[in-house]
């Protein structure tokens, strides 16, 4: 059982399973039994070779803003900067990120390019699973190598087959039931950033990430002083 000090500095992510072997000092809140704590199993975390993300309701809050400019319809969405960092962190440690959206959107395409994701799939909701499998096969991977984050019914076929199914806090009940982890953050509010940290902590890579950021910050500061 982690100490109170450890719990206070840890994001309280809801985990369905209490049977995973404790292999990390970074616990997550286990929702199946109030007061119980569990962690993401390191062996499972290290199996993950790719992370798939739904877009609407995961990278956004699900809201779509539509307007007209010179009689041309424009669509806007709100993305969270913390989730952009989450994607960057995953890619920094060599985990490809694939976005799987059930609708085509220029806003999604702009954000995907900005985040430098490895692939964006804009497909019919019913085609999410086969298209995602195709993206995996192009990389020599299978569903057993993946984590996937979803929020609604269209994500269920994928969630039910990947190694690590994850639901955001605002997900529908059926998606939460299929998930091994439910984030405390809602979609579009840092849920992807939370998932990234959960994975990297479980894999033992979080401290390396922090050292890298501190080193880069120090290098920038030294450079600024030299330029004066």
Image (cartoon, rainbow, N blue to C red):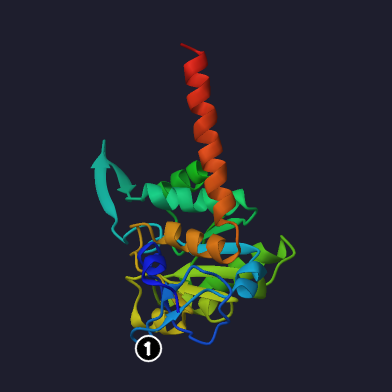
| Residue 90 position in % (x across, y down) | 56, 54
| Residue 5 position in % (x across, y down) | 38, 66
Residue lying at the far right in this picture: please name it: 140
| Residue 146 position in % (x across, y down) | 61, 69
Q: Is residue 189 above or below residue 38?
A: above
Q: Taking 25 as reference, is 95 left or right? A: right
Name the residue located 47 percent from the left edge and 72 percent from the top edge: 166
Q: Taking 161 as reference, is 69 left or right? A: left
Q: Which of 140 and 17 is in front in this view?
A: 17
Looking at the rendered image, the quarter that the N terminus falls into is: bottom left
Residue 100 visible? The answer is no
Corner quadrant of residue 154: bottom left
Q: Which of 193 and 18 is in front in this view?
A: 18
Residue 194 visible? The answer is yes
Name the residue located 43 percent from the left edge and 73 percent from the top edge: 28
Disc 1 is placed on an element classified as: loop
Name the residue located 62 percent from the left edge and 56 percent from the top edge: 96
Q: Taking 224 as reference, is 60 left or right? A: left
| Residue 158 position in % (x across, y down) | 54, 75
Residue lying at the far top in this picture: please name it: 228
Q: Is residue 55 above or below residue 41?
A: above
Q: State the residue position of label 1.
A: 33
């Amino acid at each position: 059982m982690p100490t109170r000090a450890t719990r206070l500095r840890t994001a309280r992510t809801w985990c369905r399973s209490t049977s995973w072997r404790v292999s990390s000092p970074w616990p997550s809140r286990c929702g199946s039994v109030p007061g119980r704590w569990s962690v993401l199993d390191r062996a499972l975390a290290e199996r993950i070779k790719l992370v798939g993300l739904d877009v609407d309701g995961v990278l956004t809050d699900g809201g779509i803003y539509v307007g007209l400019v010179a009689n041309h319809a424009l669509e806007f969405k709100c993305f969270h900067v913390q989730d952009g960092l989450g994607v960057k962190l995953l890619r920094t440690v060599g985990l490809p990120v694939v976005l799987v959206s059930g609708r085509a959107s220029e806003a999604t395409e702009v954000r995907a390019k900005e985040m430098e994701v490895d692939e964006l799939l804009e497909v019919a909701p019913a085609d999410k699973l086969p298209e995602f499998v195709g993206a995996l096969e192009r990389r020599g991977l299978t569903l057993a190598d993946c984590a996937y984050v979803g929020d609604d019914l269209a994500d269920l076929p994928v969630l039910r087959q990947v190694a690590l199914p994850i639901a955001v806090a605002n997900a529908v009940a059926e998606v939460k039931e299929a998930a091994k982890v439910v984030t405390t953050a809602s979609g579009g509010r840092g849920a992807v950033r939370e998932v990234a940290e959960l994975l990297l902590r479980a894999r033992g890579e979080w401290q390396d990430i922090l050292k890298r950021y501190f080193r880069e910050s120090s290098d920038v500061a030294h450079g600024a002083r030299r330029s004066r």
